[in-house]
Structure formats: C-alpha cells, structure tokens
Image: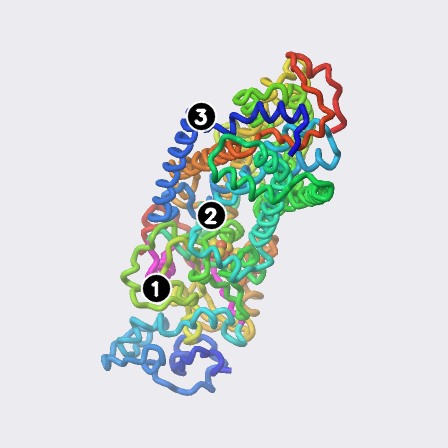
Amino acid sequence: MELNKYQQELFNHQRPVIEKFGARTWKWTIFFLLWIGLGGYALYLQIAKGHTVTGMRDNVVWGLYIANFIFFIGISYAGAVISGILHILKVEWRKPIIRIAEMVTVISTIIGPVFILLCVGRLDRLHHLFLYPRLQSPITWDVFAIGTYFTGSVIFLYLALIKDFAIYRDAKLNIPKWQQKMYKILAIGYRGTKGQKRHIRISTNLLAIMIIPLAIIVHSVLSWIFGMTLRPGWHSTIFGPYFVLAAIYSGTGVLIMAMWVYRKMYKLGNYIQDKHFIYLGYIMMVLGAAYGYFTFSEYLTDWFGSEKWSNEVIDKIFNPAKYGWWFLFTNIAGILLPIFIVAFPKTRKPGWITIASFFMVIALWVKRYLIIVPTLESPLLPMQDTRTEYVKYSATWVEWALTFAGIATFFLFFTLLSKFVTIIPISEFGGKEKPVVTTKDSAEENEIAPA
Amino acid sequence: MEEELNKPGIKTNRKDFLKKGLFAGSVLATGAVGISSLTSCSNNSGKKIKVLTADGKLVEVDSNVIIEAHPCCAAPAKESRKGIPGKKFVMVIDLSRCKHALKCQDACQRYHHLSGMNVWLKVFKMHDAETMAPYWMPKPCLHCDKPPCVKVCPVSATYKRDDGIVLVDNDRCIGCRFCMAACPYSTRSFNWEEPQYLSETKGAVYSPELGFPQKKGTVEKCDFCPDMLRQGKLPHCVTACPNGVFYMGDLNEDSVSNGAETVRFSQLMKDKGGYRLNEILGTEPSVYYLPPVNRLFPFKDVEITKENTEETK
Ligand code: SF4
Ligand code: SF4
C-alpha cells in the first residue's frame, strides 16, 4: 500500500503504539483485570447464592444492572449515529475521530447486553429466548434489534478497518508473526485497486445509512420495555424519542472524553485538534437543549396532571429527602452545564468541554437510575412489608463490583484494541490534507464546517 | 363435559363435588368413583382417615390421598396450557366479611409449600383516603383477562388459559422479571435464593398447576389451585377462610361457592354491588370484590408485622 506524505507521517506517529506493549499499558491492563476479577467473584456469588446477594427484591425487580444496560447501549450511539451521520453528510473533519467513535460503539454494544445477562435469574435458560420466542414481548424485539445492531456496527467498523489492515500488513511492522498473519487475514487481500475501493465505499455508505435507523430502533425498543408497562414514570409516549436522544447525547459525551484521553496519551494533538472538541461541543450543546426540553415536558405533564399514582413517583423524584438532590444534579450537570460551557467562548476549550462531558455522562447514568428505581418503588397497592429491603432499593457491593467490572472491561477492550489498530485511521486521508500545527487557539480561527 | 373436565385422567367422586358445593349444577352426570382410585396416586395404603370438609361434614378417605392429593391431580406442563374445557373461573371476595384472620394465607402457604419469603395471597390494609374507612383486602392473583404480565413474557413462561387462569411454568421461566414489573397488582414473587422447604416437596413432580417444587431464579404466584379445580374442589384459601370471604366458581355456569353456600354470580354482583380492582387499567381481572358494607366485624387495626406478612409458614 502506497502512503502519501500525510498518511506516512500519521502512521509513523502511531507506529510505536502498535509495536510496543509498554509498561504503562501493562499496568493498566492488570489494573482492569483485577477489577474484572473482583466482578468475577461477585458473579460467582450471585450464581451460587442467587440474586439475593443483590439489592433487588419483589418490588424493585430491576436495579443497577438495567441502568448500566441502558447506559452502555446509549453510549454506543457515539459511533452509530455521530459517525454515521457525519459520514453521510461527508463532513471532512470527522476523519480523525471516527475510529474512536466506532470502537466505542462496538465495545459498549458488547458490554451492555452482558448486564441484562447479569440481571436474568436463569442464565442457563437463555436458549429459551430462541426456543420459545414470543413476538409480543418487547424483550424479544430487543434481542433481535440489538443482535442486528451489533452485527451492523461490527461490519461498519470492519469496513473502515480493511484498508488500514492492508497498510499494517505492508508496513513491515516490528511485531510478532501471529499478529502479522492476523493483519494479512483481516485485510482480505486488499490492494487498493479501483474495484476494491469502490466496493468498500458503497458498502460503507450503505451501512452508514442502515446503522442510523437501526440505532434508533434499538433504543426505542429498549425504552418500550418500560413504556409498554402500565406504570407511572414509564408509561409515556415520548419514551422512545426521549431515550434515543439521551443515547446520542451521552454517546457524544463519551466520544469527547475518549478523544481527550487518546490525545493526551498518544500525543495526537496534531490530528485530534481543538476544533474537533468544539464541533462536537456544539453538537452536544444542541442535543443537551433538546434533551432538556424532553425532560421538562415529561415531568411537567406528569406533575401538572398529578394523578394519584403518578404523583407518588413524582414526589419521590422531586422530594429532596428522597431522590430530589439526585434529580437536581441530573438537570444541572446533565443539561445546564454542557450548554453553558459550550455557549461561553471562555470555556469553549477542549479541557472544559471534556469536564462538562464527564459530568454529563455521569448525570445521564444517574438519570437512568432515577427512571428505573423510583417507579418500581411505587406500586399501585400499598407496600405493607416490614422487610425494609423489599420497600427501598439499595444496590449491594455485588452489583457495584459487577458495574465497575463492566466499566473496566470497557477500558480494557479499548486499550487492547488500540494496540492492534491505529486510533486515527490512516487510509481515510486522501492526500489533500497538509500537516497542521495546532496552536492553542487555532481552533477558534477555523471555520465551522456544516455539521 | 365431565370427562373433559377431568382431562388428566382423574375421576372424581360425585359426592365430593356435592359436598364442596362447587359446580353443583353439572355434577349429577358424573360417575361415582372412589377418591382413592385417582390414577396417578393409586398406591392405596388401605388406611382410612377421617377428615372434616369445609362445610363441616366428616368423611373417610384413604390416607395417601391426603398427602398426595395435591401432586396427583395437576396436569403436566403442556396440558396445563390449555385449561379445563368449558370453564371460566371467577372469584368473588366479600370485603364485608374479612377480619384479617389470615387463615387463607396460612393455608395457601402450607399447601404450596411456600417459604416465608414469598407470599402468594396478601391481605392489604386499605385506607384510600383520610375521609374513608379502612378495611382489609385479601388479594390473590387477579387472573386478568388482559394480563399485562402475559403480554411481556419473552418465552411464554407465563400464559393465559382458556379457563381464565394465568399460570407460570417455572421450568421455562428465564427469570427476567419483566412480568413482575408489568403486573400492576404486586402479585408476583421471585425466588431470590434457593427455596426453603424443598425437602417437603421432594419427589413431587413439578407442574405449573401445582406451583411447587419452587426453583431458584424463577417467578411464582397464586395459581387459583387448578389441581383442586380439576378435582372439582375449591382452592385452599376458599375452604380455609372461617368467614366465607372467598367465593370461587364458573362464570359460564353463573355460580360461585364459598363452601357453605352456592350462589348465582350475577345475582351476587347485582345485590352487593361487585366491582373489580382498578377497572381503569383495562386489565379485566377475574377476581371481583364486594364492597365492605354492613361488615361482619368492626375494623380492628393490626400492626402489619413481620409475623403476619412473612412468617406465615
Ligand atoms: S394480577 Fe398481575 S400476575 Fe395476576 S394476571 Fe393480573 S397482571 Fe398477571
Ligand atoms: S420472569 Fe419468567 S415468567 Fe416473568 S416474564 Fe420473565 S420469563 Fe416470563
């Protein structure tokens, strides 16, 4: 594979990352593995003793696991929607960041469903989902939707990788034999002929178009697990779009954070520039405003209508003695903060935007918790149970351990994957680009591309 | 029709039908077969035991029947999906007679070998508003005709039968608990840990109509005692209640019985103003309530304690 000057420079810059598995990487890997090990022990306890080791009981039948499930499927939107849409719109500046975005997608689409498995009481009977599928159940819709979405995302990532694999194959990297061989297999004989280029272009375009509706279906169906029940706080017609929006929003936040980490770690400042943060910041701001609007109309209607049953949930969410502070936090950190940080030129900087993303992503996780737990704590008939754990949910260490194991797995996969492929795709750049040197404020001078 | 009613090959004693007062109208054609010749528990011990029926009569039955009456009459899983032909079961709960004696709950727990953790029949203290009078409300599964729990199950482990009963098959349930989240009446329980009292049910062949042996990681709930209904008997809560709060019967025959008296269902609804719980939800329960008017007992508040909610066993 012939590389042009820009590509050569980009490749040389990232080459050491692939060639060396440094001490720092080892340290992190071991750290993540320790977390996963602890999660493994928690999982063993849960399987041996049953779900009694979790905080879930007959009223609050779902807890942290389901919140994590929604959260991870949500952030998977980084690749699906952000990179899909930018691809279709042919936005040039997307090129350095799409690989990260698609990696987020594939990895979180693997981890999300694992949390469902942790929640299910009989792991040994999962095949029943295919033996006795019932099309009426939103869970069945989810199984098919997530399965298709995952396959689509993997292919989307892979298509963008084929050309890069060919580059790694031909670059005579200083890597073990098996890795050379792997690149050779994965490159499936790509030589950059006209026909091959065309095939990849067409398939990528097709997938970019397909992945967007698929992503929308996945999160709508997911929201309908709640929306299709008769419970206040769940039984809402806007739940589909509300969840979809929250997902794109949190996906953008995670993408910004990942960009920041990689830029720092591998000194990619010349490629992942300030402007990327700012453009994504703008996207985040718009999504934040829309998300705020949805949140407002959802809770306003429930509160204003004030049906008795809805009121019970609303009271739990608004009351400072219950979940009130958390709810306030989700609104400040999850809606106002990103909007204001991006709105003011003073704070419209990669560091600030990353901080805002960080808080926003946490706020959105808390929000998922607030969607699930208060509703389950408000059954229609009075809860006259003296067993406090049946009345109020509080997650146990087992659930937390598995949650952190999930996050550690996310980071671990990311670390490992970035040792096999370059974080910034090389083949994407056609040669028109000239090497850029970023000054601190260069981004502000840049024009904003139509996004 | 009687042959069909006893589908799993169970022949029932005609006297037994009459004694229990259930299905009284349709019973006369049934052949008289001894209770101890029930097919699946035919090992006759020869020992006879005297038992008191709900309506106060002393009868003599084989000792084996007493112990195994339960396991012997339930249909296997596949058949349990169909229901008893020609029937549409309804229950009526007369709130004016309930004094929170909890005998129904005791019987339910005992016959289903339930551990203290899971209670199928809960008795709620209802006090809808400050200005209203409190009352006790026993609540089994309402066996909704449009059951939200059945709608959401991904593997059809919970299902609605032709005779109106909603059952759970714990051999199929994957434990996703979606049905629990979907049921608006807090009916279902989950086996969060290995069920206790497994030794009591050792050897019993599981059937969704029995509800035991329980299994860890699966859902369970009140099943209207279909194994009793197959024998033409009343569910355990109905016979255990000393005040005749529960009536069980067949909508098609328009008759319900609480063991002591058999009445026309439609007449009962008309006379006492029957209603269903939260009609507005559209779940169309099979359980009807009679309002707590002209009460038999004054409402005596009982602290709902650990003992009477969980340690009922
Ligand atoms: S009361 Fe609940 S469990 Fe019973 S049928 Fe209705 S929805 Fe299902
Ligand atoms: S917990 Fe069992 S019965 Fe309930 S919905 Fe899931 S699989 Fe069906």
Quadrant occupied by the N terminus of chain A: top right
Task: Name which residue type carries label 1.
Answer: Tyr
Host chain of mark 3:
A
Residue carrying label 1? B111
Q: Residues within 10 Å of mark 3 (few under 14, many from 20)?
A: few
B140 is higher (above) or lower (below) than B75? above
- Residue found 60% across the figure and 45% down from its top: A188
Q: Secondary structure at mark 1?
A: helix
Q: Earlier in the sequence, mark 3 or mark 2?
A: 3
Residue carrying label 3? A22
Nearest to the observer: residue A361 or residue B2:
A361
Task: Name which residue type carries label 2.
Answer: Leu
- Residue found 69% across the figure and 31% down from its top: A290
From mark 2 to mark 1, how far is it between C-alphas? 33 Å
Residue A373 seen in the figure: yes
Magenta range: B88-115
Residue A301 seen in the figure: no
Q: Position of residue B235 (x, y in %)?
A: 41, 67
- Residue found 33% across the figure and 53% down from its top: B194
- Indicate left or right for B108 with A71 as reference: left
Nearest to the observer: residue B86 or residue A21:
A21
Host chain of mark 2:
A
Task: Tell me the mark number nearer the camera, choosing from 3 and 2.
Answer: 3
